[in-house]
Image: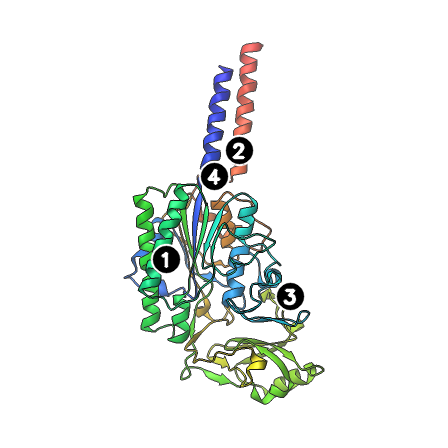
Amino acid sequence: MLRFIILVFCFILIKTDHHNKSSKVIFILIDGCRWDYVNDTSLKGFAKLAEFGVKAEYVKPVFPSNSYPNALSIVTGLYPESHGFVQNIMYDADREEFFLMLPNPNSTNPHWWESAEPIWVTAEKQGIKTAAYWWPGCQVKIHGIQPTICLPHRYTAGGENVTKDIINKLEEILDLFEREEIRLAMVYYGAVDNNGHTKGPDSLETKTAVKEIDKILETLQNLITEKRLFDQVSIVVVSDHGMTNTSPDYVEQISMEPFADDIKYILNKGSSSMILPEEGKLDKLYNDLKRANIKGLQIFKKEEIPEKYHFKNNKYVLPLFILADKGYFINELSDSNKTRMKVKYVSNGNHGYDPDVVEDMRSIFFARGQNLKKNYLSPPIENVDQYNLICKLLHMTPAKNNGSWDRIKDMLDAQSSNSSSTLITSLLLFFGTVWTLKLMFFI
């Protein structure tokens, strides 16, 4: 009798361990997908995710609400001052080197990326094979580790060929899942952001890009259903930030040209800029900007930046930081050597504004699959929170992070209790049973 109970218990443990090891996640980042884009009732893929899974009311991006700060917060659970990507464009004064976004030169130098450990690095270290398709940074050896599969980052306006390309890769991912070759797949889609910038957030082109990714999501869910994989595979769909109207006839322009002589570098434009003054000109430039009393512009020395932004305590934050209010737009200087932005275009949409003030910066979160509730509308979450959920779905130990488990835990169904607690409970029951049998048969 005792041997039989031991065998049954071991079988349960083996089955539970297999279930944990078979859990898989497809993690999709839709760049620039504003929270209200998905309210279009014609969208079937997003609607199906919400009906059979979890949708957050909205997601608050980290500050500044730009792509690289948020993309890295999503995959590390850390604020920008901790993971190191404090802006899309940065300057390393020690190395006299610029980060100018992928695929620009120097952007793949590991030192930009190694302040933190992205989720694919943590996964690979724990024996979970990963694949990243066009995800920013996957081609970089971070602490010497890359995903098992990586297609380098790309940024497109979308279109039929891109849609077909992504669907083909999703079919490939499901095949890899079935062969147990990977357990985490990450896919990047940039067309919503691209069209939001060039055409505007309310343009037909942006709406078309949203419909393209919706078609992709619908196809993916149908494929998983056909293959009967929803007991193993979870889908998580996120965005880094939203988008607001910055067309020239909508916003007031802010010119920094009157102060150009005292500026060595001014990085980024639109919503905010970091400024490195000419040597010895910090106080003069700061005071001149303050005296100018420029409408719609906030000016901070590095040490004055509010703590709530979780932004200033990093070496890549320059001595001066300027932040535009909604309805205002900081123009680049005419000297591209100072701005480091060699491509100039009319920006009909932009992001990077204070997400506590500008609702258009809010983004999306959807999840469907194993251990997730159905038809559940979550209260708002933050971009640092999603990392812990991915780790939970993969039964993976997360690295230390800034995410809040309290904002995520109610997305899980009642049966998805902590695996370590479940194991402890099982062990206690087992040894209690053994002790009881010993009393019955041997006393």
Residue that numbered label 4 is attached to:
21
Q: Secondary structure at mark 1?
A: helix
Image mark for residue 166:
1
Q: Residue 355 location in percent, x, y?
A: 50, 68
3 and 2 marks in contact (CB < 8 Å): no
State which tag comes first along the sequence, 3 or 4.
Answer: 4
Mark closer to the chain start, 3 or 2: 3
Q: Mark 2: few, some, or many residues within 10 Å (few <14, many ≥20)?
A: few
Given this view, does label 1 or label 2 mark the residue nearer the observer? Answer: 1
Residue beneath the point at 36% across and 42% down: 229
Q: Which residue is mark 3?
A: 314
149 vs 305: above or below: above
Pointers 4 and 2 in contact (C-beta within 8 Å)? no
Q: Residues within 10 Å of mark 4 (few under 14, many from 20)?
A: some
Camera-side mark, 1 or 4: 1
Distance (Cα) linking label 1 and label 3:
36 Å
User: Residue shown at 48%/84% (left/top)?
Assistant: 253
Which residue does the numbered mark 2 point to in the structure image? Answer: 423
* Marked residue nearer the N-terminal end (1 or 4): 4
Task: Report the mark closest to the observer, 1 or 3.
Answer: 1
